[in-house]
Image: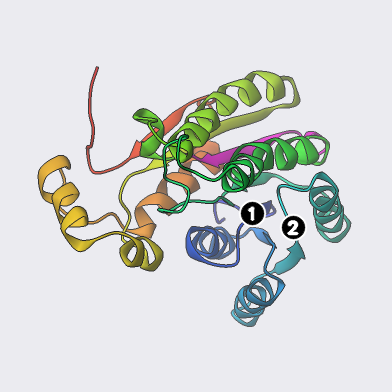
Amino acid sequence: MRRFDGKVAFVTGGAQGFGAAFCRSLATQGASVVIADIDDHRGGIAADELNASGFEALTVNCDVADEKSVAGAVARAVDRFGGIDVLINNAGLHLTRYNQPFSTIPREDMRALFDVNVFGIVNTSTACLEPMRSRGGGAIVNISSMAAYNPITAYGVSKLTVRALTIALAHDFASAGIRCNAIAPGLIGTDSALADLPRPFVDSIVEDRQLVHRLGHVDDIVAMADYLCSDQSSFVTGETFKVSGGTPLWI
């Protein structure tokens, strides 16, 4: 029996990047996957690829910052699959545009940042509460960032809030049998990150700040997500796990 046989996973931002990798991993381990994304075109391609590989995937339009959009996406997922067992709150705004001090980031960008990175998690988690409770509980995984541990920019503060939300939701949803944890990725060598960051800056992190001297891989984050979504982590909730090659470490 595969790890997620009979499970239904709802992944926000599931059309590309981390989200698409989460979806493929969950699907190959038996889950029916809901690709919840604001980009219908990419979402449709991702779902078609999974279905063509013999997996079960559904794409739903979902703007996590819009409560009504989230409610509609969750309703479609429940109508198709009967409930939700796993929620990965992956959708987020990031990179240099949002990684600015509060004194310089445009207010419009700051509002969008918190609407997606913070209220988006609240919207999707509360919308999935009853569909998960009806299945006897489940697991939520939020995507934070190592920027949350030195929150000197608007982005860092938004991801610090994700860590706090993870604790709050773990308390709030415990009676429904739902665990809530988070992952704080370090520098991961995605196309978008490498295109956005100067190469000398990337090299300095890998060589001078990390204890593991290589770029992080998407699979490093997927492996942690799989663990936190599975029954192997049934005694773990309210935690944020750093996956960062050992930077920074402290007691």
Question: Which amino acid, by three-letter code, is at mark 1?
Answer: Thr
Q: Residue at x 63, y 79 (%)?
A: 45
For the point 64% across and 54% down, the residue is 12
Query: Which label number is shown at residue 153?
Result: none
Q: Amino acid at mark 2?
A: Cys
Q: Earlier in the sequence, mark 1 or mark 2?
A: 1
Q: Is residue 139 magenta?
A: yes
- Where's the N terminus, which quadrant? bottom right
Residue 242 is situated, as x and y percent measured from the top left of the image, at 35, 36
Tag 1 near tag 2, CB within 8 Å: yes
Whole-percent x and y of residue 97?
Answer: 46, 53
The image shows residue 3, relative to residue 151, as above or below, that is: below
Q: Judge from the rendering whether residue 227 lies leftward or rightward of residue 85; answer left or right.
A: left
Residue of label 1:
12
Q: Quadrant of residue 129?
A: top right
Local crowd at mark 2 within 10 Å, few (<14), some, or many (≥20)? many
Residue 62 numbered tag: 2
* Relative vertical location of residue 232 with respect to residue 50 in this rendering, above or below: above
Tell me the quarter of the picture where residue 118 sits: top right
> Of 94 and 22, which appears nearest the observer?
94
Judging from the image, what secondary structure is the residue with disc 1 in? strand
Q: Nearer the viewer, residue 232 or 37?
A: 37
Q: Is residue 9 magenta?
A: no
Which secondary structure lies at badge 2?
A: loop
Viewed as shown, does residue 161 lie left or right of 41? left
